[in-house]
Image: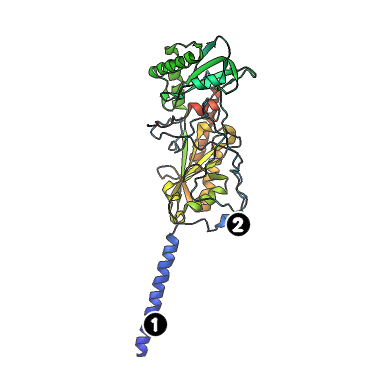
Amino acid sequence: MSTLQLSLAIIGGLVLAGVVAYNAWVTSKSAPRTARERGPQDAAPGAYEGGAQTGRFDDTAPVDLAERSHTGPGLDISQRIEPVLDDGPSPVAASDEPPQEARHPGPPVVPVTLSNVVHVPEKKPALDALIDVITPMLLDGEVSGDALLAALPGTRRVGSKPFAVEGQSETTGEWESPRAGQRYRALQAGVQLANRAGALNDIEFSEFVVKAQAFADAVGATPDFPDMRAEVARARELDAFASGHDAQLGFVLRARRAAWSPGYVAQNAARLGFVAGALPGRMVLAGSQSGQAPILSLVFDPQAAMAEDPEQSALREIALSLEVTHVPRSEQPFVRMRQAAIALAEAMDGVVTDDAGQMLSTDTMDRIGADLESLYDALDSHDLSAGSPQARRLFSCPPPPRFA
């Protein structure tokens, strides 16, 4: 082989090696960032501490995504009902699980399936004349809690509205859901006036009367029903107020360059205090009080979270959402939502936008914050403060229908 041929062969080999190396570099740059990578934020763990809380929360309530969405006044960001909405504390359901620690000390280990289930012990609110139709039931004598439980209807709903029965405790004098082994001298039945499905209507009121009467007959009580027209009118008035004072806020974080893996998102979100929710692709920031709804939700493609190899799944965007009427004002939820969005965007090289892809400026976020303060004031003035049991019940979606 001549010197010229040898030189050409060497040059060809070097060119081929360069092409292979370049293709490998391009492939590595386009792959999603995974939880094993360490970015600049790892140099100062704990630099953002505002989101870390210890608490328990309800993340298991069903949802009907077809329900209407009320829009708060003046909010110029896309409204959304986040895919798992709390149906509010119910006077009839119960669960009791230990607390979940929200802070992850040290380098967090987060399962990429994000399928941890966290329950909250229910604190059942009494029927409230502000948002319920209440029917007193007169008794000739005492009745046992066991008899009341046996007589309760199979379904605790009237149309799309919750139905409940309460007895006045002989020992404490407080109204409560019937309990075995207790004795009661007074009873009342109720149905909610409105929720996100709309106002209580004539048909639902009639169904309530039928269901309450059947229960009363079974326990030997005499119900005293209020006037249907007056209650339906009250329901419409309450629903009109709710329609103008309900808001769900959503920020979208979009990747600038490299995509993210589910584990990479979970790793960065855990540093801000988020923990895995009940469904794949969902994390939540717990409230400071037991039984409180999550302050924020972080949601991404559940299919990516459930993939055979989630670390190879590529996410180009994630969503942060705030159920405004479900979170107490004292938690400063919008401030924390804003801080979390900015912190995640900086840590993962992303941008904060609305649903339409428009970047959210500081001025826009300031206006949203001001509008929310007005919304909170209006809710407070109607005794429906954000995060209260009454507000969570009023601004709730009924569960989807169940088929036999």
Disc 1 and disc 2 in contact, CB within 8 angstroms: no
What's the image's color scheme? rainbow
User: In this picture, is 362 found above or below 88?
Assistant: below
Q: What residue type is labelled 1?
A: Ile
Examine the rendering and report whether any part of residue 131 can be seen: no
Q: Which residue is drawn at 45% across and 14% down?
A: 213
Across and down, in percent, residue 216 comes to: 48, 14
Could you say which is closer to the camera, residue 158 or residue 70?
Answer: 158
Residue lying at the far bottom in this picture: please name it.
2
Q: Which residue is drawn at 54% across and 11% down?
A: 139
Could you say which is closer to the camera, residue 195 or residue 251?
Answer: 195
Across and down, in percent, residue 361 comes to: 48, 43
User: In this picture, is 38 found above or below 317?
Assistant: below
Residue lying at the far top in this picture: please name it.
140
Q: Which amino acid does label 2 sit on?
A: Ala
Helix, strand or loop at label 2? It is helix
Helix, strand or loop at label 1? It is helix
Could you say which is closer to the camera, residue 316 or residue 349?
Answer: 316
373 with respect to 399 (left or right) = right
Where residue 43 is drawn, which disc sits there?
A: 2
User: In this picture, is 33 found above or below 88?
Assistant: below
User: In this picture, is 52 found above or below 214?
Assistant: below
Where residue 10 is drawn, which disc sits there?
A: 1
Examine the rendering and report whether any part of residue 230 can be seen: yes
Going from the N terminus, do you reach mark 1 or mark 2 first?
1
Where residue 339 is drawn, which disc sits there?
A: none
Q: Which corner quadrant of the image does residue 397 belong to? A: top left
Q: How crowded is mark 2: few (under 14 residues within 10 Å), some or many (20 or more)?
A: few
- Figure quadrant of the N terminus: bottom left
Q: Which residue is drawn at 44% across and 59% down?
A: 31
